[in-house]
Amino acid sequence: MPSKSRGRNRAHRRKHKKMDSGGSSGEGEQDLSHDMGAGDTELLLSMTKEKTTRRSTEPPEDGEGVWAITIQVFIPFLVAGLGMVGAGLVLDIVQHWPVYRVVSEVFILVPALLGLKGNLEMTLASRLSTHANLGHMDNPKEQWSMIIGNLSLIQCQAIVVGFLASLAAMVMGWVPEGKFNLDHGLLLCASSLVTASLASFVLGLVMVAVIILSRQCNINPDNVATPIAASLGDLTTLALLSWISSLLFDAIGNDRWLAPLIILGGICLTPVWAWIASTNPHTREVLSSGWTPVICAMVISSVGGLILDFTVANFKGIAVFQPVINGVGGNLVAVQASRISTALHKDSKIGKLPPYESGVCMNPLSAFCKPGGHARTARVLLLMVIPGHLIFSYTISYLQAGHTTLTPIFVVIYLIAAMLQVQALFSFCVIKYLSLVQRLVVLLLYFAHVMIHWMWVRKIDPDNSAIPYLTALGDLLGTGLLAIAFKVLYLIGDKDSDVGD
């Protein structure tokens, strides 16, 4: 009897184990269905569906808090701002040099060549930051291949864009007046070529170093690379342009062969850089498809240069503020553009939006008011605008630079112009309660969001195309609105000897 009892107990345990594990007989599932009523089943299905929907409509967390983003962005932003202040101080000094007074078309080159940091260096930073975040630069062999290919690519693009920028300066400066000076034309072309090539090479090396160090220090390169490119770009480019154009201006009477020789050297080097970039798998596609945004951005920036050329003749004080107002909006929107592009590369294939994106043209309120994701970053960037402009403006005043006294009315009008720079790219539905300086950045940020997703859906890599358009548009709006601000100041009676000098 004991043996039979033990056998029955073992059979009973095997039966219950089979039921608990949901065996092939389905007895466990039948018991579960029996225990759960119809209402409980519907509740379970509803909770599962809600969880799945929430997961598909929210972007994945990137592990960065608000303070981490703020610190990583604001410190490079301040450094970039000081670089822009330095560029403004340089422009305030060199505008009185003979080359700027005699060949005033050099002013048209200034925004176009300063814009190269957005056309080339910031695009390079965005492209390499995406590769770094995806882990493509962890392999030393792949890393060197990307570095060589990208440096060759930006050299080729810099020479071509520099040449086209000089042509644009000649056309915009001389056609309205019906004059042409061959020596001045050669000076513009040679100065533009050397400045673009040298500045792009130096800044390209700096960008590579920054991205590699950021990766090793566990810092998101999207947050720091583009502001650092801007911090060095304006000052380096403007100093090179002024120095080289002054040397060539002095050489017009004695060494007239120097400018043509420089132009010939640039033309001969262009096919070499293009060949290196075309043989590199990381830059082959960009070499063939990346010209449209770069050239269009150069043309947009050149229009801003034409405005600067006309305005600086009447208001000398505008020179010191021009790089600052142009740079703030462009730097912040470049950070956002780089982060959005990296997220798209991580979460979906090009041509198809990730599940958490409802469409290309999203509600502006959603772009800034969502609890996390890109909306959180946009709010952080937006809060930096007014403090940044105040810091940079009073730094200029403390250094006693420029031709303009920072009166209260000047500060108000200047901040209005800076905010309108952002507003021109957005709608009023989210910014009607914001100050006018912030509106410019708001518009740029929203326009960046729409443009990048539009490019992604059409299989255009935003790393190669978005930032040039955004920074060039910021340059044009910034220069135009700053010119209007100085005109308004003059009309309403803020005519101290500095503003109207």
Image (spheres, rainbow, N blue to C red):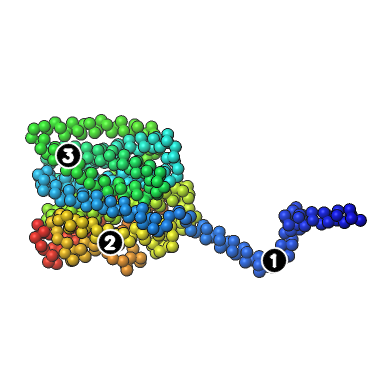
Residue at which label 1 appears: 36
Residue 262: x, y in percent?
19, 33
Query: Which image quadrant: the C terminus?
Result: bottom left
Characterize the local packing of mark 2: few (<14), some (14-19) or many (20 or more) Cα atoms within 10 angstroms.
Answer: some
Q: Judge by depth and name the residue closer to the eye, 385 or 45.
A: 385
Mark 2 in CB contact with mark 1 (< 8 angstroms) = no
Q: Residue at x 72, y 55 (%)?
A: 21
Tell me the residue that label 3 is attached to. Answer: 244
Mark 2 residue type: Ile
Dot placed on the residue nearer the N-terminal end, 2 or 3: 3
Which x, y percent locates residue 65?
42, 57
**Residue 20 relative to residue 344: left or right:** right
Q: Give the residue at x 44% y 40%.
A: 138
Indicate which disc, 1 or 3, sits on the residue closer to the N terminus.
Answer: 1
Q: Name which residue type carries label 1.
A: Met
In the picture shown, does residue 466 fall above or below 262?
A: below
Between the C-alphas of marks 1 and 3, the distance is 83 Å
Determine the secondary structure under disc 2.
helix
Q: Nearer the viewer, mark 2 or mark 3?
A: 2
The residue under label 2 is 386
> Is 332 on the left or on the right of 20, as rendered?
left
Q: CA distance from mark 2 to mark 3?
A: 35 Å
Report crowding for label 3: few under 14, some 14 to 19, many 20 or more residues within 10 A (C-alpha).
Answer: some
Q: Is residue 446 visible?
A: no
As helix, strand or loop, the secondary structure at mark 1 comes to loop
Q: CA distance from mark 2 to mark 1?
A: 59 Å
